[in-house]
Image (cartoon, rainbow, N blue to C red):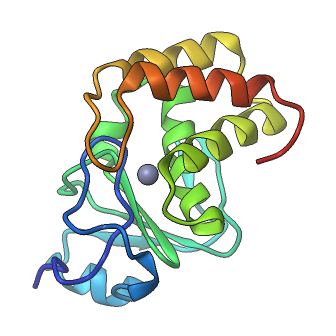
Amino acid sequence: MKFRSFVRYTGLLIAAAGAAAFADGGPTVEQYVASTNGTAYIVPTGELRINGYRMRCGTRATVIDDNLDDYGAAYPGFIILNTKLLLRLPQPVMLWIYSHECGHQFRGPDEETADCFGVQRGRREGWLNEQGLNDVCNFIAAAKGDNMHFAGPHRCEAMRRCFADPAVH
Ligand SMILES: [Zn+2]
């Protein structure tokens, strides 16, 4: 069973169809994992390490699903990571992706807000500096943009502003 009928927050690069109305909810974490025929698994809250780096997002669980059609995604209440894709990226980009998805948990479906949440969290926690931000920008540069995402260069510009902004978004 696929959750096409449910609404997923859009991922980093690929927009899920009809992803605007996140308030419609989605599967529970258990339903999601069951839908993958045992290929995905849950990492309980507080136990997630990304390339050795401990990350958390409030009380949200993480699902590792290496068949996900993007680097990361989120439904209200949990975050999904494709570690097969993620672990090829520079460390700051991996952590930013998780934090972008975490941003959706606290700030809702807006992509630019989730981007901003991710870089500000990196700044605050000390894992994102100017060089790391360049890595994030290089990563996102390939994104073409669609109805949910601005093109990469625009997202990068907004993130640089946000990174330099002392006010928390
Ligand atoms: Zn997103």
Which residue is drawn at the image coordinates 76% and 48% (left, top)?
169
Q: Is 60 displayed left or right of 155 in the figure?
A: right
Q: Quadrant of residue 60?
A: bottom right
In the rendered image, the residue lying farthest to the right is 166
In the rendered image, the residue lying farthest to the front is 147
Which residue is drawn at the image coordinates 42% and 76% (left, top)?
22
| Image x and y of residue 143, in percent | 29, 28
Which residue is drawn at the image coordinates 83% and 45% (left, top)?
168
Q: Is 102 displayed left or right of 67 in the figure?
A: right
Q: In the image shown, does 40 or 6 lie closer to the viewer?
A: 6
Q: Quadrant of residue 12?
A: top left
Quick check: can you spot residue 23? yes
Quick check: can you spot residue 90? no
Q: Quadrant of the N terminus?
A: bottom left
| Vertical side of 69 occupied by 16: above or below | below
Q: In the image shown, does 33 or 11 lie closer to the viewer?
A: 11
| Vertical side of 48 occupied by 133: above or below | above
| Image x and y of residue 18, in percent | 24, 69
What is the tally of numbered marks visible in this picture?
0
Q: In the image shown, does 89 or 131 lie closer to the viewer?
A: 131
| Vertical side of 148 occupied by 140: above or below | above
Which residue is drawn at the image coordinates 24% and 54% (left, top)?
66
| Image x and y of residue 8, in percent | 33, 70
| Image x and y of residue 51, in percent | 51, 38
